Amino acid sequence: MDIQTLTTFFMYCTIINGALLVLWATMCILAPDLVYRMQSLWFPISRETYNVVIYSFLGLFKIIFLVFNVIPFVALLIVG
């Protein structure tokens, strides 16, 4: 596998995961009540606990996105 193939792979991973992160954050900002009602149908959870959990997972996903997608893509761009 060459650097060009890896760069293309990480480019698409960054685009797809970045779009998911933006979509998730947008839903949490623009329609928090809708998302909470949908989730509370399946899982009995208080609103305060839901807020802590959803924003913790959002932060964790952002860190994982940066570490495993953006940084390798930028490193491959620099090397290539």
Image (spheres, helix red, strand yellow):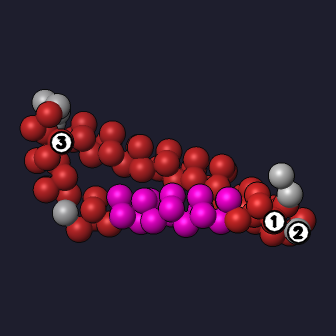
Q: State which quadrant residue 79 falls in.
A: bottom right
Name the residue type under label 3: Gln
How far apart, in angstroms, are the residues tagged by discs 3 and 2? 44 Å
Q: Do the residues bearing badges 2 and 1 touch, measured as CB atoms within 8 Å?
A: yes
Secondary structure beneath label 2: loop
Instruction: Give the residue at mark 2.
Output: 80
Secondary structure beneath label 3: helix
How far apart, in angstroms, are the residues tagged by discs 3 and 1? 41 Å
Q: Give percent across and percent down for residue 57.
A: 41, 43
Residue furthest to the front = 1
Q: Is residue 47 visible?
A: no
Instruction: Give the residue at mark 1.
Output: 4
Magenta stretch bounds: 9-25
**Marking on residue 39:** 3
Crowding at dot 1, Cα within 10 Å, few <14 / some 14-19 / many 20+, comes out as few
Could you tell me which quadrant the C terminus lies in? bottom right
Name the residue type under label 2: Gly
Q: Give percent across and percent down for residue 36.
A: 17, 48
Name the residue type under label 1: Gln
